[in-house]
Amino acid sequence: MAAPRVAGHRRRTPVTQTPVLTSRSWHEPSAHEIEGMGADVVLDLGWGQLVFGQTFRDQRGIVDVLRGEETGRRDICVYPRDPQVLVGMAPDELFIDPSLTYRLYLHRYRPRPEVIRGVFVRTVTSEAEMGEINDLYARNGMVMADTATMWANHRTRTFTYLVAEDTRTGKIVGTVTGVDHGLAFGDPEGGTSLWCLVADKQDAPPGTGEALVRVLVERYVARGRSYLDLSVLHDNTAAITLYRKLGFARVAAVCIKRKNPINTPLFASRPPGLEKLNPYATIIAEEALRRGIRVEVTDAEWGEMRLTVGGRTVLTRESLSEFTSAVAMSRCDDKRVTRRIMRRAGVRVAQGALAREGELDDARVLLADVGSVVVKPARGEQGRGITVGVTDDDGLERAVAYALQFCPDVLVEELVSGDDLRVLVIDRQVVAAAVRRPAEVVGDGRHPVVDLVKATSRRRERATGGESRIPLDDTTAEVVAAAGYAMDDVPPNGERIPVRRTANLHTGGTIEDVTDRLHPHIGEAAVRAAESLGIPVTGIDFLVPAVDGPEYVFIEANERPGLANHEPQPVAERFVDLLFPETRRR
């Protein structure tokens, strides 16, 4: 006799409401599952093609598509069936990406109860904003995309391009791309996927990445889609933590990519110590590895590497290499010598005077003539010992005493107004130009200045691998006071408050690329300065009233400029071209 049925009894094992074509990469789809689904589906996202492996009836078609990958792009095959078989068809060309696929079933999504402050997520509104997205890609080491392709995609409902704005500044500080599989190829599962999530390491408020993901999720929930998938590198702990917090869980799907120079770090062994290099050495090492150049990290803390092609080896310390002679380096090291060489080369320099302990007469005369001066050690780097804006005799004595702590000789120069411009010259060519700005904080109406400085400093530190931070010292307090605030004051939302006088990157300064706007006259002066110093790689510093105007005053030359500060310009490429011209991309 059958047991009686219990009223209200519910099945404990959940019933899958949708097909599982993509949840198990080895699953052979039935005719019912693929009915109405497009065949051999490939989407162009501008940075590469998205190849939907489950739509290909013959795996050899996937191999053919990936073999056709264009130079400088990154094609990705997602949801391939039997990936080991696919890679086995071309093991010298393809590899399984060391990433994990995470999935959020949208019916399980729960909105965040409170708003993420400081961030506004919206849809892209113009092709120009696609260019800003590209800048974010470049600053985060991602493959840049064709903006026309992205804009054309965005004008269809298949693609969704979102950006995050900092509500204090209006600046775009993050982006994410969504793909609707149902609209792309009639996906029977009703799936979607997330690509290219990035938040500006330096400027994005906390929670920017989460805000972007949530808005994209909510867009697809509103469309009635089933799930959202994403791929993340297996060691990206911060991103994985965020996805798990939002309810994503791992599924067995994998990605297949082609063995190209861009993907080399994903399939080739990495030299020991590479992960310990600072960003200025890392950018060079990565470019060398992309070209097949052997990289040996000889002193990670020092940023020193040995690069080898065939039987030829070059030792580098970040952008300083054996190609820079000791004489050229000493010319840059002593600012007094640099000034003399610039004058002889016809490069304009600021009025200056020398000072030593107890010998301030010439400096006092200069101060009386020009009204405001900069005091700095004759030898030194990274902004150490510099005082800007000295206007009286007492201030001059204090500034000279401070500079003497770093060097027995002190240089006093006229304070020239204008933007702090760094022009990067490699092999007698201007490769990049950027305006450097002193560190500042932006008020949010809730936090005191001291907390804003700490938060901004943490972001700068993360963005530069610990190379840049804003000191909490007397100078910071003085600059804040000059702006009309105390360190414990709470400035209004959007209020910009300077916190340092100098634009040095090591004390939290920021940098804005102006290469396309640089006046030819300033570029010529930079090249002339580098040639007169006899140095193959240098950062020439000017003060300029306008980047696109001809006027300038030379400040100093740096023999070891930080190349990572000038992305997205091809600075690492030009540096490696100089060292190993035989590896230059034709």
Image (spheres, helix red, strand yellow):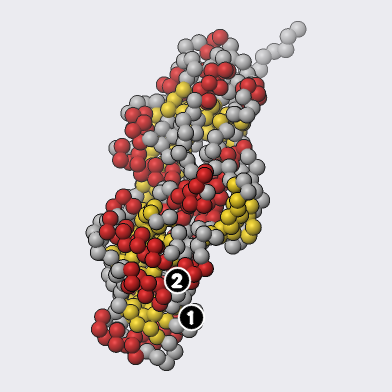
Q: Which residue sits at x=47%, y=40%?
A: 585
Name of the residue lying farthest toward the top: 1
84 on left or right of 144: right
Give me the disc on residue 331: 2
Q: Amino acid at mark 2?
A: Arg
* Residue 312 appears in the rendering: yes
- Place of residue 388 in the rendered image (x, y in percent of width and height, measured from the top left): 36, 75
Q: Which residue is mark 1?
A: 407
In front: 378, or 198?
378
Task: Specify the quadrant of the image occupied by residue 221.
Answer: top left
- Place of residue 337 in the rendered image (x, y in percent of width and height, measured from the top left): 41, 75
Graded by Cα atoms within 10 Å as few (under 14), some (14 to 19) or many (20 or more), the crowding at tag 2 reads: many
Above/below status of 289 relative to 550? above
446 on left or right of 102: left
* Residue 509 appears in the rendering: no
- Place of residue 502 in the rendered image (x, y in percent of width and height, measured from the top left): 38, 69
- Place of residue 178 in the rendered image (x, y in percent of width and height, measured from the top left): 44, 32
Task: Specify the quadrant of the image occupied by residue 162.
Answer: top left
Graded by Cα atoms within 10 Å as few (under 14), some (14 to 19) or many (20 or more), the crowding at tag 1 reads: some
In front: 158, or 168?
158
Q: Which residue sits at x=43%, y=64%?
A: 534
Above/below status of 9 relative to 429? above
Q: Which residue sits at x=33%, y=79%?
A: 352
Q: Secondary structure at mark 2?
A: helix
